[in-house]
Structures are given as structure tokens and as C-alpha cells.
Image (spheres, helix red, strand yellow):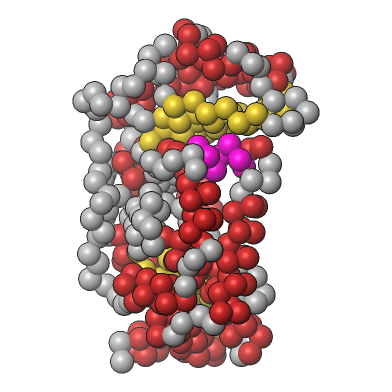
Amino acid sequence: MNIILDKLNSRNIMAAKLWIEDGSRNDPKDKKGIHQLLSSTMLRGCGPYNNQQIAEIVENSGANLNCETYEDGLLLSLKCVESDASKLIPLFGWMITKPILEMDQIELEKDLTIKAIKRQKESNYQKAFDGWRKAVYGIGPYGHDPLGSIEDINKIKKEHIIPIAKSLIYRKKVLVISGKFPINIQNYIENSIEFNGISQNHYNKKNIYINNKINIPYEHTNSIYTNSLDTQQVILILGKATIRYDNKSDILLRLLSCYLGYGMSSLLFKVLREKYGVVYEAGMYHPIRESQIPFVMHASTTKEKAILTLDLLKECWRKIIDFEISPEELELVKIKYRGQLAHSFQSISQRAEHKAHLLGIGLTKDHDQKVLSRLENVTSKEIKDAANKYLKNPSLSVCSNKEVIRKIRAHWLI
């Protein structure tokens, strides 16, 4: 386990983030959501503590303990005062080495997860994005939400979760602690019984779980996905699965994402909101992802303006492929990107999470500095070349009523 200490003057508050490689992308095909169940159940009993005892330890300290499932990994999070670090940090170790996984707690988490999936499905945006993800990634590692599917969640039993839990100790891990923490905290972690074995490098040993390969993008065949609902709203998702985050061209797509969807000076806002007034909401989704990063435009409009909105989205997409950004626009986009990066370091929790995430997906501690150094010399031509290389032939997902979908499908396939 790689331990990174990021000491800051934070008035006795510390944040710890432990990234464990492989999240929902490593769910077996018929057990989508199993990592989500594991991560949530680990909080409900580990080592010598049952669910109630863990809750008491955390709450009596006024701390916050959480575990989230992402596509690329699991993220254990702790925020507490410095004096409670030695009492709370060991929970990380127990959660990995000795999760209790009691049947009643697993069933409770299954019920909560199913309710979360149902709430998620109430969002038309989520339905449209799920459709786009299915069309683009198929049954590949990024083809489903980390929460999983209701059908698979219902099938998962304790005996299915145990091998996944046992595999955690073998996976690559990065622990980042930011803020003010005990001076001997690294030595304590490396020598404590709770972390026994975790601090050693087990990753080269044979894993007991199947690692889904994500190096080769899923070759999708559907350029349009539709979801028919009884609604007057129209949700349009237009996007492409792109490259790995460690690709040298990633910064070029990041700049394009800022150009298209960041702030009121962005192209989508100026065209869809200011000039034509056709949307309720429009923006970009371009997360940090180890591989096959989605580069997605999204817009919400009415049935009367659906075709025009789609044409405008396509026009914006074509513009970044066919034309170079002006020098003035490029300078503004670079400023926006620096602002986005600075925002990820606003709090000690954000600092720790950002560092743990980047290191967890195989990047170096100075990755951001390298990107910022390169940023100065990025040209409009480089950005246009990257758009031509990675953004041609996007896929469309539509969520609306049957009449609107019929019209959009016909228009899209012209």
C-alpha cells in the first residue's frame, strides 16, 4: 500500500482517503452491483466491531466514515480530528482484512441499493445516460452504473461477496492523508495489527477475482438508443467513449470540454440558451476515468424544439472537429481548466481524494504539475487534431415520448 502524507495547517482536522483498485468495472456480468454491496456492507461490521459498535465509535468522535464505489475503484473516506486518528484509522484496516459481512446487514444493504436504483430511474436524464452507456459500452466493464441492476442485486448472496472481499488485500491501494495528523501515523499504520499484510505489496500475487480488461474500447454498433416514456420532456445525450486519463491527449479533450460546457461563456450555453433559447439545461459530462472516458453533451428541451436542439448539438460537435478555437477562446479555456483544477484542492478532503484517485489509477504525484506545464504550449491545432482523432461518429441517446422519438430517429438517420 502506497501511503502519501499531505501535511497542512487545518486546525487539527485530517482527511484520509484510501483508494482500492477495481470497482464496478470488475463486477461479474451476472452480478452487477456486487462491489457496491461489498463497500456498503464493510461499514456495517469489521474486525472486532459490529454495526452498532462502529457507528458508536464514529459518532462519538464526531467523525465521518464512508465507502463509495466507482467504476475504477472503491474509495474509503474518513474525516476526523487529529487526536482521534489512532482510534479511527484502524477501521480502514479491518474493513479490508476482516469485514464481517453479516447476512442481515447484506440484506439491508441490498434493500437500500435497490431503492437507490429505483430513485435513480425516476430521473429521465439518468435513463437517457444509461441508454447511451449501454449503446456505447455494451456489456463491457463500463457498461453499467456502479449501483448495479435490480435483477442482479436480488441474486447476490453472501457466498458471492466473500471471494470479492478476500481479493481486496491483493489489490493495489493508495492511502492519502491530508491536513493535520499525528507525526508517527505512517509508522503506526505499517506496524499495526489492523493493517497486517495490507502495507505489503501483494498486487503481483495471483488474484482470486477476475479482472475485466479495459484496454480495448467496446466496438458498439448502435449509433442511436431510445427510451420511450409518457413525457413531454426530451432528453438528448450525444457523446463518445474516448481515451485513457493518462493519455497525453487527454488534456486536449479536457480543454474542449471546458470550451463546450463550462460557464456562461461556453459554446453550449451561448448557442442553446442565449442565441436560440431551446433548452432548460445543457452541459458536458467528462469525468476522470482510467480508460474509455465518456465525452458527453447533454440537453433537456421540449418536444416542439427537439429537432432544432439536436441540430444545434450536432453543429457544436462539428464545430470542434472542423474548426480551430480562436486564440482568445483558447486563452479563456486554459483559465477555466486551471480553475477547475484549483477547485479540486479547495478542502483537505478534496485534496486527499484527488491525489488518491490519480495515484490509484496509476498516475504520479506530479501529474497535475506536468499537465499545467504542458498547458502553456497547447495550440488550437493540437486540440482540433485530437477532436478529429477521438470524437468523430458520436452516439445519441434520446428519452421522450414515442412521437418525438420517431421524428428524432428519422432525422438522426438521414
Q: Position of residue 161 (x, y in %)?
A: 34, 29
Residue 142 inside the magenta-drawn segment: no
349 left or right of 191 in image: right
Residue that appears at 40% across and 18% down: 198
Quarter holding residue 22: top left
Q: Is residue 123 visible?
A: yes
Q: Is residue 330 above or below residue 99?
A: below
Q: Which quarter of the image is occupied by the N terminus? A: top left
Q: Is residue 227 visible?
A: no
Q: Is residue 207 above or below residue 191?
A: below
Q: How many marks?
A: 0
176 left or right of 220 in image: right
* Towards the viewer: 385 or 16: 385
Q: Which quarter of the image is occupied by the C terminus? A: bottom left
Residue that appears at 30% across and 60% down: 137
* Towards the viewer: 298 or 251: 251
Q: Is residue 196 above or below residue 171?
A: above
Q: Position of residue 222 (x, y in %)?
A: 27, 72
Q: Which range of residues does the magenta coloring cover?
A: 350-357
Residue that appears at 37% across and 90% down: 411
Quarter holding residue 177: top right
Q: Position of residue 246 (x, y in %)?
A: 38, 51
Q: Residue furthest right?
A: 11
Residue that appears at 57% across and 27% down: 5
86 left or right of 230 in image: right
Q: Position of residue 373 (x, y in %)?
A: 52, 56
257 left or right of 247 in image: right
What secondary structure characterizes most of the magenta part? Answer: helix
